[in-house]
Amino acid sequence: MNGWLRQLRRIVKFGGGVAAFVFLPGLTLTSIFDIATRRFLQLGSTPLQELTWHFFFACVMFGIGWTYIADRHVRVDIVRERLPRRMQARIERALLIILLIPLSLILVWFGARMAWISYVQDEGSRAALGLSARWIIKSALPIGAFLLLLGACYRLARPLSTGEDQRGC
């Protein structure tokens, strides 16, 4: 089972790497270029703005699974931090089973359907000068949800008492 967990972690870590080394630099560069051209050259670009939004969405979706297994996600710690570690682990496992895994499965199912319909209909931007092939960015939803599902399975299967994830992913 240890090899299986390592493989899950590797897949989710790859998604986080794509977010960090492909989409985040793309987001940064398109944002800087868009701001500079609008500010100094008075040139607005609808495709460039849409591309910035697409990079942001892809960055979030591809990085969400890694963020979860690295325990770097946002959580409300008002109550959790006051509980013993064993109780924290039990609550996390229960919420994984009750909320996160079903939500991830729903997002994978409906996100894949939405991306497929977009592909079949050759959906593009609603803006006249916007980007075409909207299915590409819509595909980030089921991929990111699948990575989150794998991250949830990893957290559910691994022993929660180890500090393995906090040493860096």
Image (cartoon, rainbow, N blue to C red):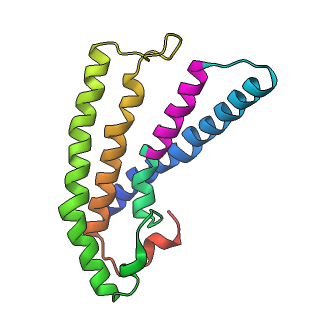
Residue 76 in magenta stretch: no
Task: Quadrant for residue 34, please give it.
Answer: top right
Image position, residue 93 (x, y; %) = 24, 71
Quadrant of the rendered image containing residue 106: top left
Q: Is residue 47 left or right of residue 28?
A: left
Residue that lies at the very extreme toward the top in this rendered image:
128
Q: Give the quarter of the image for residue 136.
A: top left
Percent x, y for residue 145?
32, 46
Camera-side residue: 86 or 32? 32
Check the image and name the residue furthest to the right: 40
Tell me where residue 132 appears, x and y as whole percent: 45, 15
Residue 61, compared with residue 96, is above or below; it is above
Viewed as shown, does residue 122 lie left or right of 72? Answer: left
Q: Is residue 63 visible?
A: yes
Establish if 166 lies above or below 84.
above
Whole-percent x and y of residue 5? 31, 63
Q: Is residue 78 left or right of residue 104?
A: right
Residue closer to the observer: 137 or 156: 137
Vertical side of 156 occupied by 112: above or below? above
> Which SS type dominates the magenta stretch?
helix
**Residue sitting at x 30%, y 46%:** 146
Q: Residue at x 72, y 18 (%)?
A: 43
Region rendered in magenta: 46-60
The residue depicted at 43 percent of the width and 16 percent of the height is 126
Q: Residue at x 42, y 75 (%)?
A: 77
